Image (cartoon, grey):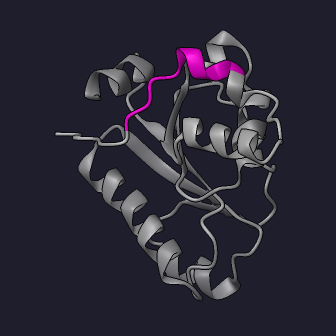
Amino acid sequence: MLEAFFRVLGSELKMQMVVYGIGSIESYEPPQLQLSLAILLKRKFSWIGDIEVLDPILSVTELVCWKPWVVLFYQLMSKGRQQASKPTPFFMPHCEAELYDNLFQANWRTERLNNIVLFGTSLGHINSMHQSLGAQLMLIPRGISWLFESSRVNLQ
């Protein structure tokens, strides 16, 4: 698994981690645990640089509380359309399928897709859920064939 990270990292020394849709850290325990995991990943791996959190529902209290660990907070989200012009881990542990789809739409070029490391819900699971509901995501189904996905990760 680590080889995959280093392959994406290439000659970069650090990757800025982007966290989408973490939710209200002040109001709910799961977002607290998810953001804590992102911070622990940064502490454990020297190649994770700044953490950028993008969520429209963050309160001023949350911004102040997490400031020592998180460099940038944005309340206005790009709806997942951030372009990966350099190696970037996207931490999306509990996001809607549309955010994943928007991320792929914004990066649907080989050089950008090769820059993405995605921590989140299984794309295969998202795809099967949407198909069972009769819905069709624009890009996730086409991406499944090249995707490396692991449900159990040992990063040691």
User: From where the camera sits, is residue 4 visible?
Assistant: yes
Residue 74 part of the magenta segment: no
Decide: is 96 above or below 114. Answer: below
Give the image location of residue 18, x and y in percent: 58, 48
Query: In this view of the protein, which residue sits in the foreground, 54 or 98?
Result: 98
Give coordinates of residue 14: x percent, y percent.
41, 35
- Residue found 74% across the figure and 75% down from its top: 57
> Which picture quadrant has residue 86?
top right
Residue drawn 79% across and 56% down? 77
Query: Could you say which quadrant of the image residue 127 lies in?
Result: top right
Residue at image point 36% right, 22% down: 4
Residue 20 point in image, percent of width and height: 64, 55
136 to the left or right of 54: right
Residue 17 location (% of width, % of height): 51, 46
Residue 4 to residue 44: above or below: above
| Residue drawn at (56%, 35%) of the image | 124
What are the residue bounds of the magenta stretch? 142-150
In this view, the residue in front, 68 or 8, is 8
Q: Quadrant of the C terminus?
A: top left
